[in-house]
Image (tube, rainbow, N blue to C red):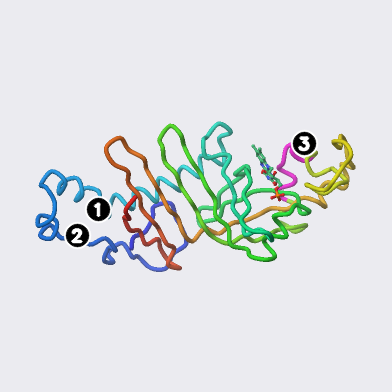
């Protein structure tokens, strides 16, 4: 287990706690070539795991404020009424201390029905440049017409607000594309989704080898382990 410099809420200082990753040179030497031993030892380093989880949250934070960031448009996976369901979303902000990914949606959209069935979600991020994939799992809290949504609505650009002004619910049948709606009523359709993340699967594709790690929120800290890619 280890703490993260990014200020996630946690109890006590767990930096000195034993790492999940255990590594025995003896057993490795018995089964692997020496060159692989060096590589593996490097990959099993717990400090590196700590750096990975910090990089992940750092990247998510950047993505929420940089329109061109490759993680700006993640895919949200839900348990749909008829099976798994995915869609692209805009990552609006990140609450590091609460480990929350914050997005906006129409309260009438189908995914809201999904959350009533099961609030568990998985977010998928991929950066084609660095070839890093992050899958982040957690639970969604839906905010509608409360202090939180009022603040987000005030900060939202006008163009974004117009998305909520349609009289038809997203996905409902229509003879033609709806052009304009009642702007005054738009706020009533506006919802903010806060996904509290408790599990992260990180995969880095490499030329020689791939690397993969998993992080679980213990309630006070992230526990990280290397896993086979
Ligand atoms: C680039 C892109 C960004 C999108 N961003 C959002 C978003 O931030 N919020 C949202 O509710 N839908 C967004 N959508 C639309 C969703 O992908 C989806 O079509 C819509 O939310 C309805 O999904 P549902 O029927 O599963 O609820 C976006 C679509 C694209 C292509």
Task: Find residue 44 and name its label.
Answer: 1
Q: CA distance from mark 2 to mark 1?
A: 7 Å
In the visual, does 98 lie left or right of 22? right
| Main SS of residues in magenta | helix
In the visual, does 105 lie left or right of 41? right
Labels 1 & 3 near each other (Cβ < 8 A): no
The local crowd at label 2, few if under 14, some if 14 to 19, many if 20 or more residues have their Cα within 10 Å, is few
**Quarter of the image holding residue 31?**
bottom left
Q: CA distance from mark 3 to mark 2?
A: 55 Å
Q: CA distance from mark 1 to mark 3?
A: 49 Å
The residue tagged 2 is 23
In this view, the residue in front, 126 or 147, is 126
- Considering every residue shown, the one lying at the far front of the view is 82
Secondary element type, mark 2: loop
The local crowd at label 3, few if under 14, some if 14 to 19, many if 20 or more residues have their Cα within 10 Å, is few
Which image quarter holds the N terminus? bottom left
Which region shows up in magenta?
151-161
């Amino acid at each position: 287990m280890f703490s993260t410099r990014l200020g996630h809420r946690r109890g006590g200082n767990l930096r000195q706690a034993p790492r999940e990753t255990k590594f025995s040179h003896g057993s490795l030497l018995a089964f692997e070539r020496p060159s692989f031993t060096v590589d593996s030892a490097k990959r099993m380093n717990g400090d590196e795991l700590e750096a990975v989880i910090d990089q992940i949250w750092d990247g998510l934070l950047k993505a929420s404020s940089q329109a061109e960031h490759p993680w700006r448009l993640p895919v949200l996976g839900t348990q749909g009424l008829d099976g798994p369901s995915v869609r692209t979303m805009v990552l609006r902000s990140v609450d590091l201390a609460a480990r929350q990914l914050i997005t906006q949606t129409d309260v009438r959209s189908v995914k809201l029905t999904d959350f009533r069935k099961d609030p568990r979600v998985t977010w998928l991020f991929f950066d084609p440049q660095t070839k890093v994939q992050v899958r982040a799992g957690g639970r969604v809290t839906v905010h509608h017409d409360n202090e939180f949504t009022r603040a987000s609505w005030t900060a939202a650009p006008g163009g974004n607000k117009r998305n909520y002004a349609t009289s038809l619910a997203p996905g409902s049948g229509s003879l033609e594309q709806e052009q304009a709606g009642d702007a005054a009523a738009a706020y009533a359709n506006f919802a903010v989704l806060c996904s509290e993340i408790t599990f992260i699967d990180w995969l880095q594709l490499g030329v020689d080898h791939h690397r993969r790690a998993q992080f679980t929120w213990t309630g006070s800290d992230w526990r990280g382990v290397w896993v086979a890619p």
